[in-house]
Amino acid sequence: MDCFSTGQHVETDPRYGLTCATYVAAALKGAGIDILDIATWVPRPGDDAWSEWVLGLLEEHAPKRAEQLAGQKAPFRVRPDEMAAAASSDRYPVTMNEAADAASHVRKAVESLR
C-alpha cells in the first residue's frame, strides 16, 4: 500500500487498511493537500498496545476482517488528535513532532466539552 506517495488508495490485498486518521490524510493527499510529512512518523510506546486492542475489537465484531489482518503490524500510528492538530496548522506538511505537540491543544479542547 502506497497511498501516501501516490495519493490513491487502491488496495486489493485485504491484509492492509487505513485508520480513521490515515484515511483522512490519504483522502486529503488525493485532493492535492499533502497534510502530513509521513516520513517523520515513527513507532512510539503504546502503538503496539493500541494495535492489539483494535485487533481484539475486530476479532469480536468482524472476525473475518481480523483473520485477514492477523500478523500485520502498522509501521507507525497517526493518532486522531494529531490529525486534527495537523488540519488546523497554517502550513503543510506537518511533521510528527509538530502534530504531537499541537495535539495537546486538541485534547484540552475536547476535554473542555465534557
Image: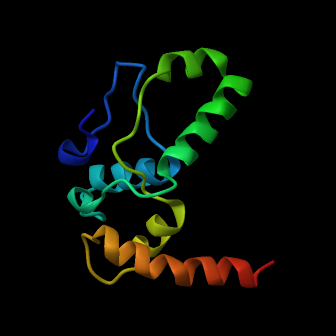
Q: Name the colouring of the figure.
A: rainbow
Horizontally, residue 105 falls left or right of residue 30, namely right
Horizontally, residue 63 falls left or right of residue 91, namely right
| Residue drawn where x is 33% and y is 43% of the image | 75
Q: Position of residue 46 (x, y in %)?
A: 52, 55
Q: Position of residue 107 (x, y in %)?
A: 61, 77
| Residue drawn where x is 57% and y is 20% of the image | 65
- Rendered position, 9 above or below 93: above
Quarter of the C terminus within the rendering: bottom right
Q: Position of residue 101 (x, y in %)?
A: 42, 80
| Residue drawn where x is 67% and y is 24% of the image | 59
Horizontally, residue 88 falls left or right of residue 107, namely left
Q: Position of residue 94 (x, y in %)?
A: 29, 72
Q: Residue furthest front?
A: 45
- Rendered position, 113 above or below 11: below
**How many numbered marks have been drawn onto this rendered protein structure?**
0
Q: Residue furthest right?
A: 114
Quarter of the N terminus within the rendering: top left
Is residue 88 at all visible to an observer of this figure? no
- Rendered position, 83 above or below 29: below
Is residue 53 at all visible to an observer of this figure? yes
| Residue drawn where x is 42% and y is 52% of the image | 77
